[in-house]
Each structure stands twice: as C-alpha cells, then as structure tokens.
Image: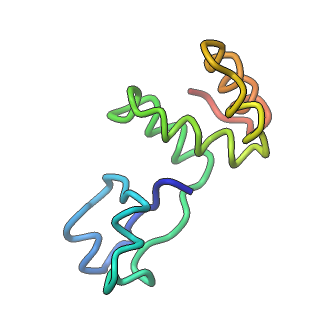
C-alpha cells in the first residue's frame, strides 16, 4: 500500500482531511499509525477520478489490491489496460 486514509476524529484527520496519506509519511518514526487505515477499492477509484489522476502510485495500489502487481510491474506503456482490468476485477469505476 502506497497510500492510506486518515481516520475521522483523529489529529491526523485534522491535518490531512480526505487527502491521501503517503506510506512514507506513515513509516516515519513517531507517526500515529493507529490514526490511519487502508483505502478501499472504491476510495482508490475515487482518488483516481479526482485529484490523484496523475499519480501512478494510486494506479499501482489499485493493481496491488486486485492481485495484479506482477502485471503492473511488467506493463510498460500498456499500464492503462492493466488498470482497466484491475478496476473490472474490483468492480469499481475509474
């Protein structure tokens, strides 16, 4: 997982709101890991449709969630086809 979401009602949510929290931030020493949670497939798809459309890590997360990491790593310029198959597999609209 490359991104997380902040849990509502926490200091982390006060800081990030509905923005995605990058995994490198969560990995920092002292970060309150109990204040973040995994994203759902629907939340990843929403991020792709929104502010994160240009962030390849969100697409990679979607493929990871669909158990298509190997396909993602090997896709090259055909990444859109792999993402589309992952979205179909997860039953989400991107």
Query: Residue 73, relative to residue 23: is it above or below?
Result: above
At which x and y percent is residue 68?
A: 77, 39
**Lateral position of residue 21 relative to residue 69, left or right:** left
Identity of the residue drawn at 73% across and 41% down: 69
Which residue extends farthest top?
A: 77
**Lateral position of residue 9 relative to residue 26, left or right:** left
Image quarter of residue 73:
top right
The image's colour scheme reads: rainbow
Identity of the residue drawn at 38% across and 67% down: 6
At which x and y percent is residue 84?
A: 68, 22
Image quarter of residue 12:
bottom left
Quarter containing the N terminus: bottom right
Identity of the residue drawn at 61% across and 28% down: 93
At which x and y percent is residue 92?
A: 66, 35
Q: Nearer the viewer, residue 34 or 60?
A: 60
Quarter containing the C terminus: top right
**Lateral position of residue 93 relative to residue 85, left or right:** left
Query: Residue 80, relative to residue 61: is it above or below?
Result: above
């Amino acid at each position: 997982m490359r991104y997380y979401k902040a849990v509502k009602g926490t200091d982390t949510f006060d800081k990030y709101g509905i923005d995605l929290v990058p995994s490198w931030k969560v990995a920092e020493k002292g970060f309150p890991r109990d204040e973040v949670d995994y994203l759902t497939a629907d939340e990843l798809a929403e991020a792709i449709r929104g502010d994160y459309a240009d962030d390849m890590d969100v697409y990679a997360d979607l493929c990871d969630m669909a158990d298509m990491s190997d396909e993602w790593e090997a896709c090259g310029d055909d990444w859109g086809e792999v993402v589309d198959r992952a979205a179909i597999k997860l039953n989400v609209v991107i």
